[in-house]
Image (cartoon, helix red, strand yellow):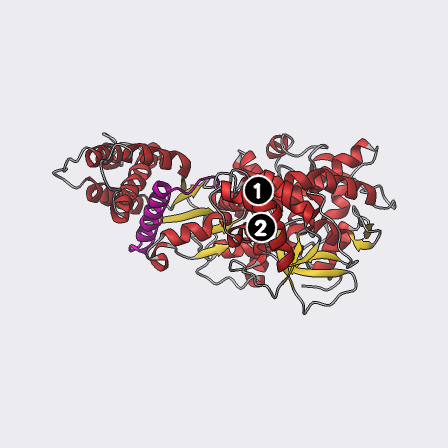
Amino acid sequence: MMISQQTANRLSVYVSDDQPFGPPDASDIAEPDCIAALFSWDNHVFADLLRGSHMIVGRRGAGKTALVSSYKGLNEIVESSSVSDLDDFREKYGLGRRDSWAGPDIVVTLKVPDELDWMQRSYAGLQGARPPVEVVAGHWRVRFWDILASHLAKMLPKRGYPEIHEATKGGVSETVLRAFTAGERLQDDPLSGLETIVKQTIERAGIRVALILDSMDEYTLSEPERLIFSGMFRATGQLLAAPKTGIDIKCCVPAEMFDVLYRTSVNPDKDFHKIQFLNWKSEELFRIAAHRLKVYLYLRDRTQFDDLESIDTRIRSALWSFWWQFLPREVTNKLGQLEHSPIYILRHTHLLPRQLIMILNSIARISRTSGQTIVPNSGDPAQLSAEAIQQGLAKIEFTNATTILSMYQNRYPLIQELFRLVLPRLKHTFSYGDLYKVWRSSGQVMMSEMGKPDFQHFWRLLLSTCAIGVVRENFHSERYIEGDFEFNSPQPLFISDKDKLCLHPMFSGAFASARGRDPRVIIPRGIDLRFDERV
């Protein structure tokens, strides 16, 4: 681990005794060197990014912002890594010669909420029908080229690149939209000239430019919003389909909205290029957390760091050897049963990095209040006790659950009240008929108030939030019932009256759901039960 003293000083703002695993949200980290230091890139998600994905789809907390930030700081990651590590990574994930480690020279981040608001206000004055998608896409393209031109003018000297500086005068995108909403026809096409100048400038300067579209988390997805989103995806698809421009696009899309946004497109095959779904593996999540813990030890206890730095957490058995220094091998669950502590922690998540980081920080804080420390003493047992794990997880469980629900708040204003009313009436496993009875007795009225009166609306909401899943009947275990949940499914789940259903442990804990007769507990599919094999 190579961290300069200057970077270490800045990292101390983010990594502390109260937050040893660092900020759960990557958007809280401002400095590129700190982003690079806290980012763990030994995972298939980062490898897929290097292969050239453009549409990054993930749930809130899946790491979309962290992944895009790593792309912005790709050059810093390469500079702080050894050649052998980079070569090992390329071989491990089968990256070819075309999969580039070269990061962008200029990063342009477009705040989608601001652009959406600006376009909605511009279209509000129109009389009659809304503009067709192609027209909206044209306005997005004008906006893209206008903003790219502005950033290039800021980065490049006027003496060597007078054309790009001249092109930024006048505000092309504002001019085009103003003329459109006023019903005026422009004599010249400002887009073609601007596009040509931007492309020529990028080629002359020999630079790589990245256009990042992020922050699409909370929308009602009204008809005007769907139209503008549809135009945006059409515009990005057209830009990516054009001959080499020197411009890469990374568009971060929340998985909670992806199905609706995908259906807004009349030609999704052209509008959605190289989609990357962020689905994490168990050991990758604990590898991320191990990396962050090593950063904490580097900053707080260099002796302990030196003792543990040699553990190669890229190897599965070594990864768990590292964690057994901090976690007890087993913890007693609420039913008095023993479980491996990593499984106990992970099955209360949606396999998302942010949720795991929040839980581990919570456990560490509980340990501190009881006089324990996360740093193990030589020869002593792990310092994070089973009691701290139980209390730390319980303390953050409701926060994680309600954070998930907040993604649906704009479309389902009563979702928090609905879940408080409905989930305590469901057992940890239940039938389709049981779910229907709960809907009739507790959920139907509230769903109708939100304009979703049908039973199918109700169970789709529960499935899409991953509060409930489908029991996998072919999974056999004396301790666990395995469930399929949408967070680890490539497609939306649908259910019938033949399915056996289950509550996710996070939601059953957060909303105090009742227990069924089956003594086994729910484990989401995708949580790895092996702790000793090499990978």
Furthest residue toward right = 379
| Segment tinted magenta in the rendering | 217-245
Quadrant into which the C terminus falls: bottom right
Q: Is residue 273 magenta?
A: no
Q: What's the residue at 62%, 59% (across, down)? A: 432
Q: Which mark is residue 462?
A: 2
Asked if residue 476 is positioned above or below residue 278 in the image, the reply reads: below
Q: For the residue labelled by badge 1, is the local secondary structure a helix, a strand or a loop?
A: helix
The amino acid pointed to by label 1 is: Leu
Quarter location, residue 527: bottom right
Residue 532 visible here: yes
Q: 315 and 329: which one is in front?
A: 329
Furthest residue toward bottom = 474
Near mark 2 (Cα within 10 A), the count class, few <14, some 14-19 or many ≥20, is some
Q: For the residue labelled by badge 2, is the local secondary structure a helix, a strand or a loop?
A: helix
Q: Which residue is mark 1?
A: 405
Residue 534 x/y as whole percent? 71, 64
Residue 351 visible here: no
